[in-house]
Amino acid sequence: MTPAINLLKKQRVDHQVHSYNHDPRVASYGLEAAQKLALAPERVFKTLLACTENKELLVAVLPVCAQLNLKALAACAGVKKVEMADPQQAQRVTGYLLGGISALAQKKSLRTFLDSSAEHFATVYISAGRRGLEVELAAADLLRLTQGQSAAIASTAD
């Protein structure tokens, strides 16, 4: 079990865990999850960390087929500018390894933004806290557990 799954069980949140054999040669963990679980990439969400000009870390959760719109995230967070967080810092602060960072049960509570496209689905898939492990849950439950907010933070990848 991972901290994310333990939190879902403790909070009695309706969820389903899905696992697959992770290939360490794959560059995109999220797209790998969508492919191996035979899911539309729009329903599989990745967790990214960004850093504000004041060094505050923010969590952005968006479809694996999209790119994070840094300007939109900054506007939603009420800051001037954000950039992608240092990968080592992201691992240290969340307690998860890259490719397995979950928005749930991070070591430190961070402001979280879930792309508004999640509202189009009854459930979404996010990392369960380990590569090769996804958890399916309602977007509303994800927002409640992370005390997050829904926002248009994704740009379609071209």
Image (cartoon, rainbow, N blue to C red):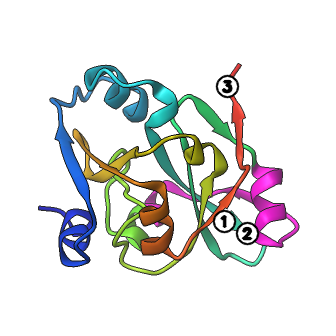
Quadrant placement of the N terminus: bottom left
**Contact flag, marks 2 and 3 (Cβ < 8 Å):** no
Badge number at residue 94: none
Q: Cα distance, mark 1 to mark 3? A: 21 Å
**Contact flag, marks 1 and 3 (Cβ < 8 Å):** no
114 or 50: nearer the viewer: 114
Quadrant placement of the C terminus: top right
Instruction: Specify whether 20 is left or right of 46.
Output: left
Residue underneath mark 3: 157
Which is more foreground, mark 1 or mark 3?
3
Residue underneath mark 2: 52
Q: Cα distance, mark 2 to mark 3? A: 23 Å
Instruction: Specify whether 13 is left or right of 86.
Output: left
Part of the protein shown in magenta: 70-90
**Contact flag, marks 1 and 2 (Cβ < 8 Å):** yes
Q: Quadrant of residue 113?
A: bottom right
Determine whether 43 is above or below 129 in the image.
Answer: above
What kind of element bears circle 2?
strand
Task: Identify which residue is drawn at 62% across, 33% down.
Answer: 66
Residue underneath mark 1: 51
Task: Identify which residue is drawn at 25% across, 68% down.
Answer: 8
What kind of element bears circle 1?
strand
> Between disc 2 and disc 3, whose residue precedes?
2
Categorize mark 3 by other alpha carbons within 10 Å: few (<14), some (14-19), many (20+). Answer: few
The amino acid pointed to by label 1 is: Cys
What is the x, y in percent for residue 129? 28, 56
The amino acid pointed to by label 2 is: Thr
Q: Would residue 14 be counted in the magenta stretch?
A: no
Give the mark count. 3
Q: Would residue 82 be counted in the magenta stretch?
A: yes
Instruction: Specify whether 87 is left or right of 83.
Output: left
